[in-house]
Image (cartoon, grey):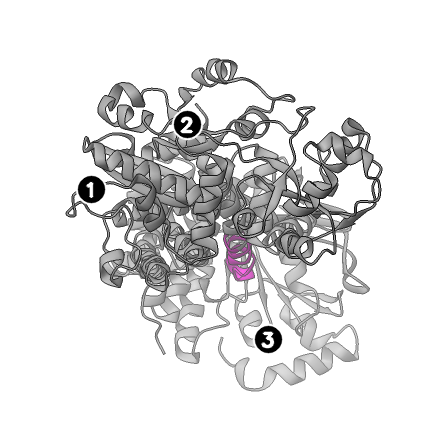
Amino acid sequence: MISLENVSKAYGARLALQPATIGFSRGRTTVLIGPSGCGKSTLLRMIVGLVRPDTGRVVVGGETLTAANLERVRHAAGYMIQDGGLFPHLTARDNVTLLARHLRKSAAFIDERVRELSTLAGIPADALTRYPQQLSGGQRQRVGLMRALMLDPPLLLLDEPLGALDPVTRYELQNELKSIFARLAKTVVMVTHDMGEAAYFADELVLMREGRVVQRGALDDFTERPADAYVGDFMRAQRAPTVQIP
Amino acid sequence: MRPHVLLLLILVPALASGQTIDVGSKRFTESYILGEILTQTLQEAGEARVTHQQGLGNTAIVFAALKAGSIDLYAEYTGTIAFELLNRKAPADLPSLERELAGHGLGVAIPLGFSNTYAIAMPEKRAAELGIVRISDLARHPGLRFGLSQEFLNRKDGWRALKAAYGLSHDVRGLDHGLAYEALAAQQVDVIDVYSTDAKITRYSVRQLEDDRAFFPPYEALVFHRLDFPRRYPRSWAALSTLEGRIDARTMARMNAEVELSGRSFSDVARGFVGSARAAGTPAATPEASSFLGVLFGPDLWRLTLEHLGLVLASLVPAIVIGVPLGTWAAHSPRASHWIMAIVGLVQTVPALALLAFLITLMGTIGAAPAVVALFVYALLPIVRNTASGIMDLPLPLRESAQALGLPRRARLVRIELPLASRSIVAGAKTSAVIGVGTATIAAFIGAGGYGERIVAGLAVNDTAMLLAGAIPAAALALIVQWGFDALERLVVPAGLRLPQES
């Protein structure tokens, strides 16, 4: 579904991402994890062209990402960030329907889709008429999810999607998101720094450090066959209270 | 018709028509006095209400006012018309001036009887001793010491040309014109250049030498008027015609002296000349020491307000139309931003009067057009900078969310970036508008109207009430404009950005 081939990125003298080749397969949830500055967000943002790689290429759905097909690829990818990334000047509904309206989808299509998604994301109709600032953190995140899913894209990219939430709301949303992913069979790439959350969502984990992929595999591989001493340290530091969720 | 003339006509409809005769004058004593004489003569005719717009500005400004119909007539000099207004190289006789001016809808008539030109003068006594009557006589006395004004020394048609025309070879010193008569009296110099109607000619006994080779072009005073004036106001015109040939150079010099040396008022001196039993009830042409409130709420308040607002709006709207795209460009291109900000910032540092002077030269006109351009230039910076910073200060997550959504550049700009930056953009436009209201007062210096007219007039005749009657409405207008933008903000800034901030 997605492959990044020999991509790298430097900001000035700092190498944010060492040359790496990595693929993500259809219908699976892959979680990129690592300490801040490890390059996991850079990698995710490359997929939708928010970061242009210095070397290599990005292939999405068989097409190499170029300026010409960038918008089309973006339409096929739902992107959601911490706190939803909602536009404060638009109501929740206008945020959700912005792209569909721009693409001149029919009003009937839009209404139908908003109804489906508000049920899926658990957003009551009256909340959709409010502005982001008038919503709770959890509601903003749910509206952000609705926006990402509006055109039913095959691909979902989530950058610290639950990072801004209080623990209870976060727990609740983790459960809901997981069931939504399972139901929709999307290709999901998620970035988090929380090992518990990663373990909960991931079909496959990718651990990064200092712009480099350290280990990739299932959770068991990480606990039982750490690639190096750092992986062991990372697992020990993260595991204690949160890994009990599943 | 030039754009600024059109603008003036739109802004000043009350003056373009109606039963008021407007007399203009330039900003020097003789012009004020002649303006008063014309005004009082017209008032005596009793055909229409007459106002005297005293000291409107320099030649170019009063001429523009005449062309635009803001005034109906004023006293001008043939040489000025030929050289400065018609750009001729050589002096012209009255018929050929008339022919050329008719094309502009203007006319010249009623020579008043004197010529205000450069002349060469000597103390009467010394001239008599040496037997000098004509300029050509000077060549026989190479020992005479000349004291000439800097202007005369440096003009192309000044000393160098005179010297060549008369074959003179005297020593020459530069001398301030204000001190020339005193230097002559103190026998520091023997020969000076004068204006033929100088006030001081009457006080110091000097002889003006005859220009026997007709070197100095004639600057005959006459009435410069709109061509349709005699037809519209036949009785007024008949009254004016009685002035023909009535003022000789000596009379004019004496009247100048009464104002400059004896401190009498312009209207007083003019009244003495017109010497009439004018009905006591006729209102004075211009209130000279009127009450502050009287001036403040004078009949011109509405016109000045419209002109002032017109200047601000005519400059602000293009500044927004051009400034917002420029700011947007700057926000998206660091390299363009570098140049845009440098240029827009640089023009801001040019002093207003210097900028106006430059624009007058560049555009070849005075009045509203260069004023609007200058105000436009000053209005750009706040708008460009606030637009650019409003867009650049958008939080990165929002910017990236818009990109990741797959909206094309233009849609991102229109649907996301500009609405989110709208508060900053409106604030920039508000700053520009308020500054514009203040700066527009300077436009009166080049005849563009507005409240500045009162400020300039107040400065020219040292009338504090008049000055305040211009400054206070300008300040009030600035406040009103500010409130107007506060209201506009509610229309332009999206509701979602105006919610009370939760703590």
Q: Amino acid at mark 2?
A: Gly
Q: Dot 3 lies on which element? A: helix
Mark 2 = which residue?
B245
Alpha-carbon span between mark 2 and mark 1: 22 Å
Picture quarter with the C terminus of chain B: bottom left
Residue B91's place in the image compared with A13, above or below, is above
Depth check, front residue: B89 or B70: B89
Q: Amino acid at mark 3?
A: Met
- Say which mark, if any, is on residue B460: none
Task: Check disc 2: other Cα within 10 Å, few if <14, some if 14-19, many if 20+.
Answer: some
Task: Check disc 1: other Cα within 10 Å, few if <14, some if 14-19, many if 20+.
Answer: some
Query: Can you tell which of label 1 and label 3 is closer to the viewer?
Result: 1
Residue A186's place in the image compared with B97, above or below, is below
Chain hosting mark 1 = B
Mark 1 = which residue?
B278
- Highlighted magenta segment, given as a residue range: B382-398
Alpha-carbon span between mark 1 and mark 3: 103 Å
Chain hosting mark 2 = B
Q: Are marks 2 and 1 on the same chain?
A: yes
Q: Are marks 2 and 3 on the same chain?
A: no
Quarter location, residue B464? bottom left
Residue B406 visible here: no
Residue A70 visible here: yes
Q: Dot 2 lies on which element? A: loop
Mark 3 = which residue?
A195
Picture quarter with the N terminus of chain B: top left
In magenta stretch: residue B130: no
- Name the residue: 38% across, 38% down: B24
Q: Residue B479, position in %: x, y? A: 33, 62
Q: Main secondary structure of the magenta part?
A: helix
